[in-house]
Amino acid sequence: MAVVAVLSLAGTLVVAGAPPALAASITSGGPLTRVEISPVLNCAVSYLGDVEPQFFGDTACATLLAVNGTLFGPASIPFGGAAAPRTPYTPVSQSAVTGIGTTDDPYTIVTVVALGTSGLRITQADSYVVGQEAYRTDVTVSNLGTNAETAILYRAGDCYLQNSDFGFGRVDPVTGAVACVAGEDDGHGNTVPGSRIEQWVPLSPGSHYMEGFYDTVWARIGAQLGFPDTCACANHLDNGAGLSWGIAIPPGGSVTRSHLTHFSPQGRVPLTTSKTADSPSAIAGATDGYTITVHNPNTVAAGLASITDTLPPGFIYRAGSTSGATTADPAIAGQTLTWVGPMTVPAAGTASIHFEVTVSSVPGDHYNDAGADGGSLVVLPTGDTAPIAVLEGPIPTNTTYTGASGASSAQYSDPVTLSGTLLDVSGAPVGVPGKELDFTLGSQTASAGPTDSSGNASTELTVIQAPGSVSTVETSFAGDDSYGPSNDSDPFSIMREDCTLAYVGDTRATGSAVTLAAHLGESDDALGDRSDKPVMFTVVGPGGQTSHHLALSDPDGTASTSVPMAAGTHTVEASFAGDDSYLACGTAQPTEVVVAAQGAAKVTGGGQISVNGRTSFAFEVIRDARSLRGQLQVVVHATKGRFHADELLGLSVAGNTATWWGTGDWSGASGYAFAVQVVDVGSGARKRADTISMLIVGPGGVTVYSTRGPQPLEGGNLSVH
């Protein structure tokens, strides 16, 4: 409203809506120096140091109620004409101020009004604790009639904050509180939201809020509509705000709704309290626990003088169980527990305590209420919360197999992750922590645990049973003193494992006896039983003739057999047809096997060639009735590399061509392999047509020297006998 509209010619503020002289008033050292309630439920508040009261015209603050198309409220609300049509309350009674202004015994005014012929009556208790920046209002609507009634209850006001009728808005989405916010100059001539607030903080659930132009707020009430949860927060205007509740009052019954009206020059808002039970259910006489958490949304730390908790009837605190912000046991008075501070709640943070209780022996749902004393800072209590369902017998559970992302099969010899979830299903399903789950897969069993806070546990099991031998996996919880047993059965199958087959037999041989060998493995590291697996070797000889040879694998998966083979080049393939445990597999490609005829032979020579510089060599290879023996020396002058053969493994002689192979040392290091082939063209001048080719490879198959094919001698001699 425009201020000029409420100025008299003398320039003084008109307070025509001020409460009558009989209004009850709480006066104190503040910071709320006056909390005044009229016999018809106007409210008026003064704040320490302010010249003007906190609501326009002092009493533009009220309790109103709409029922059956009629709006009831105070007869006079300064500039509240939009809250109309309005039927005035009928005053019934108003108490004197009682109490001494402490947390245990606050100053209190009780006001009773009747609502015409509706059969409804309002009993309103307004209370204040000296030193706090908020006062509390509890509105009880009683139905004296014989029919149930539905109504809308309003608590609203026209803000006059920090001696100004204009302001911004603010909403706390956590608590549902709505506030008027004083404006201030930002130093550049702009009015922006400041810190000071005037706030309605709901204590009862189901509230709705509104902040906006004062006349719009009163008009919403006049239309008998609940507040729409809107805020003109960013607009600097002549504003008002408030809360509303939709209520249903049974015949002969009553409904109470509560809130705080909060005033803070620093913009400090109330702290909130929450509480949770460790488990939502427990058998009679068992142990459960609670966590109380105080939340501080302000930008400065808050001190707590104490934290209190009211246990349900029959619940008993377990001595020595407190942890968190304090470890001291609480003072106990009946069912009320009080942990004495000081305790600190950090800015924008929390402080918590946890404790254990022995639950009641009486079955049913038991609720709890917790709060704290923050001195001048208001701490909102929890109200009835943290229900624990006390049961007569073990708590019913449900066990579910979850597998590894729902795994319902595994290959033979592979590991499989078995997972399960254990839930308390006495109410809304919740996880049961700290328990062990058992899994049964055919003849194999495994255990997992303890379950986590969500009731989950998992373990790994290597499948050793034959494919097709299992059709289900069983997940079970055996139960204990507190929780009943449960189990789950789900389809599960064991599949045949993939296999690999690699040729590992002879590739060079002298004489007719050749060892054919292959290794049966798997594509992963989890190996099963690979013994007695039939491996078939298919050999294609130099003339194209084909033969088949069967061998059984040993426990390591290696199958081998000795086969007579004619001299020449053969190809060998190995295959496994599969069985009950393994799928079929074979070698990736044929392997060439060279067989040299057995007979007396002697190959000698020495000289040099030019391959990236000069290379000198000397050799002697002898095969006779005694043995295959000889030596090879190679010197690569460019790199100073030296090779010395220490073992000959084979020699093949065909006409004037000799090939031999073996192992030796390269520059003093062992583990190298070599192959040499020489061609003896003739004697005399033709010796310069003799050729030699050499290949030397190190560990891992790395080539350390190669002639890159046959090279002619630049000096020396080769002889093949």
Image: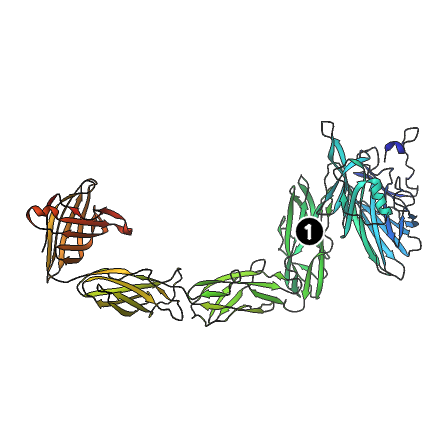
Local secondary structure at mark 1: strand
Residue 558, position as x, y percentages in the image: 30, 65
Q: Residue furthest front?
A: 543
Pointer 1: what residue?
A: 274
Which three-letter amino acid code belongs to the residue tagged 1?
Ser
Q: Nearer the viewer, residue 634 or 382?
A: 634
Residue that lies at the very extreme toward the left in this rendered image: 684
Q: Residues within 10 Å of mark 1 (few under 14, many from 20)?
A: some
Residue 595 seen anywhere in this rendered image of the structure: yes
Quadrant in which the C terminus is drawn? bottom left
Q: Nearer the viewer, residue 213 or 344?
A: 213
Residue nearest the viewer, comparing 214 with 16: 214
Q: Quadrant of residue 607?
A: top left
Residue 246, image x, y percentages:
81, 53
Q: Is residue 336 visible?
A: no
State the residue in front, 139 or 601: 601
- Residue 519, x across and y down, in percent: 31, 63
In the image, taking residue 461 as reference, residue 501 lies left or right, namely: left
Q: Is residue 654 above or below residue 688?
A: below
What colour scheme was applied to this rendering of the protein?
A: rainbow
